[in-house]
Each structure stands twice: as C-alpha cells, then as structure tokens.
Amino acid sequence: MSSLRLLFLGGTGTISAACVRAAVTAGHDVTVLNRGSSDRALPDGVRRVTGDVRDAASLRDAVGSDRFDVVADFLSFVPQHVETVLSAVEGRTGQYIYISSASAYQKPPQALPVTESTPLRNPFWQYSRDKIACEDLLVGAYRERGLPITIVRPSHTYDERMIPTLGKWTDIARMRAGRPVVIHGDGTSLWTITHATDFAVGFTGLLGAPAAIGEAFTITGTHAPTWNQIYGWLAEAAGVAEPVFVHVASDTIAAAEPDIGPTLIGDKAHSVVFDTAKIRGFAPDFRTTVTFDEGARRIIEYYDARPGLQQVDEHLDALFDRLAGHAAAIG
C-alpha cells in the first residue's frame, strides 16, 4: 500500500496510541489532533496539532485547509460530537473511520459468536446506546450524501496501563494483602480481551481500503478466557500464590454500586465471543499474539515500576469488603 495521509483524532489513548504506532510502522504520514495533555510520547515523525474536538471553531482552526486520505475518530461518544467533527472534516477526507464499541451489540446476546450482523441493542448501558446513535447518524449520512464512513467496533482492548478488573489496582492490592477479591458471577463466563497492539493490526488493514467504505467491522482477538482465568493470571503475575476469590452475582454488585452496574450488566456479565472473519479479509495478518497471561505480566511490571500509580480506591475497597462479607454470611 502506498503512503496515506492520516489524521487521528485522539492518538494517545489505549487503542489509538497503538494504532498510531502501527500506522507509522506501515509508512503512513500521521497527524494527531488532541488537547496535548497526555503523557504518552508520540512516535518520531508524527505531527501533533492542538485543538479541542468538542469546539467546532477550535477544530476547524486546527485542521485548517488540510486534506487527508483518512480521518480516524477515537473521541466521539454522542451524536453531537460526531456532528462537530464532521463540520471540520467532511469533504476533506476519503475515509472517515468511526470508533464505535462492540458493547453496542445485542445484550444479552441471543447467539454466539457475535458477528457484524448481530443486532445493535443494549438497554442497560447509556454509553452503548450513544454509540449506536452515532452509528445511526453516520449510516444515514452515508446513504443520503455518500459520506465515506467505516465503522469499527472494538471490545475490551487493553495495554499495560489498563487493569481489566472491577477494582483495577485496588484488586491487585487486595490480592497482595491476602484479602478477598470480588469476581462477578461464578467467574466462568467467557470474555474476549484484546491487546491494543493486536487490535492495531486489524485497524491498519482498513486504512484507505475502498471496499471498507459503508461497512462495519468488529476488531477483537480470538482470546476469550474466563474471568477466573483473568483474575488468576493477574494474581500469578503479582506473585500471589493463593489468591482469595469471592464470587458475587452481577445483579448484586450492580445494585450495590450504580457506577459499576451499567458496564457490568450491559457488557461484562455475559459470555461474549466474536467472529473475526470479516476483518481478517482486510488484514490477513490479524490474529491474537498477546494472550492475557502475558498481558497480565506486562501490566504488573508497568505498575510495579511506577508506585505513584498504585492507587487504592477507598470507596471500592470498602464495597468489596461488604460484598465479600455478605457472600461469606450466606455461605
């Protein structure tokens, strides 16, 4: 593929940073537009422009009269965000890639594996409904005026900075202290978890692809361990030989902590496995190369090297004590 001129809206997040690196490695000309507040370094050769993607005037000033082969939008979460972005880039790009979410797929899923034709419906999580609304807006624009869209739906994508458990570092601290760690359900549901570097391989295969216009793609790996395995690998990486795991019904956790409830009931409480045939048609090299046993080691190494990041959430810590105590009381 010849070199493409790319604009990443974002570019320093968990997923977008990996995609920027992959695009540079592929030889593309990359510009990143964000507020410039992230501590992630950009690869050599990447141009950074500063702008506020929530402010139409700021965004238009930052983009200027530039044209791009691809604009990749990692920062729009509600239709108004999308409309603001389009006010600055529509007509100036050959492809607008919108990062949606696999949580938009039907919950609970009626059939596995989930495919791109699985209905979009999530009555439990507003985040997912907003992503669906963004997709609806974009599909309408594609049909009505030919907006060159490609929709991408990642599921749980992580890197060394992201601990994928309910309590994040609080869970690691509890493991190391010999205190019980709460796992939702019975811990045996399957959860597809994808390292950002693997996601980026699939994403890069869509850049500038004419056949991807008007299409939606799930980009996840094929690695779907149980939650018991996910927590167990973290415990092993943290040097905890015999972690104490307590299983609590997802509904009970959701009732006790409204901030956790929507993402739990609307996503993580269900076994989710995806069919990745469509994206592999565009990125033949796309596959899982980092399974979570390795991912867990990278996470713990990253946090152990940065004590300042090892923050225990006192609210969640107390919540887990209550939930674990209740589970022990009812036997």
Image (cartoon, rainbow, N blue to C red):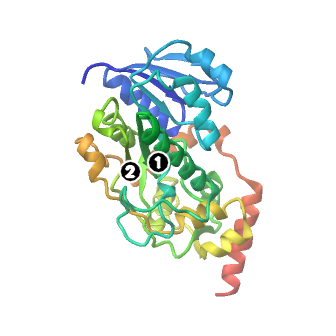
Q: Where is 287 relative to 24, above or below? A: below
At a point 43% along the width and 64% down the height, the residue shown is: 272
What percent of the width, then of the height, locates residue 19? 42, 33
The answer, for residue 159, to whether it is visible in the render is: no
The answer, for residue 310, to whether it is visible in the render is: yes
- Give the residue number, with chain letter if any, for mark 1: 157
Which quadrant: the N terminus? top left
What percent of the width, then of the height, locates residue 41? 53, 23
At a point 52% along the width and 36% down the height, the residue shown is: 74
At a point 39% along the width and 43% down the height, the residue shown is: 199
Q: Are marks 1 and 2 in contact (CB under 8 Å)?
A: yes
Task: Say how many tags the image has.
Answer: 2
At a point 38% along the width and 51% down the height, the residue shown is: 220
- Give the residue number, with chain letter if any, for mark 2: 220
Which amino acid, mark 2? Answer: Thr
What percent of the width, then of the height, locates residue 292? 41, 53
Which sits in the foreground, 183 or 100? 100
SS of the residue at dot 2?
loop
**Drawn side of residue 317 relative to residue 269, left or right:** right
What is the spatial separation of the Cα atoms under label 1 and label 2, in whole angstroms? Answer: 8 Å
Looking at the image, the residue that sits furthest to the top is 65
**Drawn side of residue 285 relative to residue 253, left or right:** left
What percent of the width, then of the height, locates residue 169? 62, 51
**Drawn side of residue 121 relative to residue 326, left or right:** left
Which sits in the foreground, 79 or 103? 79
SS of the residue at dot 1?
strand
Which sits in the foreground, 307 or 257? 257
Judge the density around disc 2: few (<14), some (14-19), many (≥20) Cα neighbours within 10 Å.
many
